[in-house]
Image (tube, helix red, strand yellow):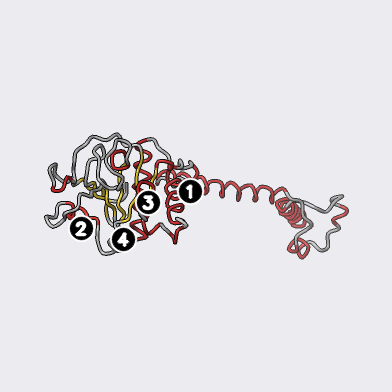
Amino acid sequence: MSINYVKDHIPKGTANNRRPALLMAATSITIHNTGNPTSTARNERSWLTNPTNTRTASYHLVVDEREVIECLPLNENAWHAGDGSNAASGNRTSISIEICESGDYSKSLSNAVELAAKLLKQYGWGVDRLRRHYDWSGKICPRLMYSNGTWAGWTEFKSRVAAKLQPIKEEDQPMTASEKKAYEDLAKLVKEQEKHLEELVESKRLVPAPPWFGEEFMYIDLGSIIHDPKFTAEGWRTLAVSLRAIHKNK
């Protein structure tokens, strides 16, 4: 990932059972908003071990505009889905991602897209494995994707993640420095060859007597010398040399 990824797990035995350390074989990824418009990823991680925090809630990953922090191992459960502790619950089967609402939220959202796509690739999943907190417990979360009940923000988020999962086409990949130089050298060679070809074609093209020839040899009856008074440019120069030699010897 291009974004900074930090592992800073809360200790086992953290107050209020926030790290129960129950092993989990995840089957989905659940997206949340923090619900706090002023909190960063670092703040959210610190809150999990803050002595004044009396909630049991916890989460695996929190992302903001600068970094991702892994607060719990991804093979242990977290209390994030609000749907209890049975074996099929979101709390026991889903990796949670909290998206911070502070700072540059559009950047935080882009980082969350990148993070979700990375995890889906890692597990060999598609976007059908993405869940909202809402899907588990009915809570309006991630609230900034609610879009007045249409969940348009959620649809857009999934589409962006899906786009990240598409393989990069070879033609879309940027050229390396060596490839760029090879391309530029080839383009230069092609241009030189095109110029050479143009010059070659021009040298073979038949043209009427050029003005300079007419001015110098206006007394010559070309019809008595050549049937069709057209030569290449080089031909006219050769004829001029011959006529000058004849005139000089007279």
Image-based side of 4 in relation to 164, left or right? left
- Mark 1 — residue? 184
- The amino acid type, in three-letter code, at marker 4 is Glu
Q: Which mark is residue 138?
A: 3
First in sequence: mark 1 vs mark 2: 2
User: Would you say the residues marked 4 and 2 are in contact, meaning their CB atoms lie under 8 Å apart?
Assistant: no
Q: How far across and down, in percent of the image, does residue 250 sit?
A: 79, 56
Residue at image point 13% right, 48% down: 15
- Residue for point 37% across, 40% down: 120
**Marker disc for residue 101:** 4
Q: Quadrant of the rendered structure where residue 210 is?
A: bottom right
Amino acid found under the numbered disc labelled 3:
Gly
Q: Amino acid at mark 2?
A: Asn
Q: Percent from the top left, x then y, of residue 17?
A: 17, 45
User: Going from the N terminus, do you reach mark 4 or mark 3 first?
Assistant: 4
Q: CA distance from mark 2 to mark 3?
A: 26 Å
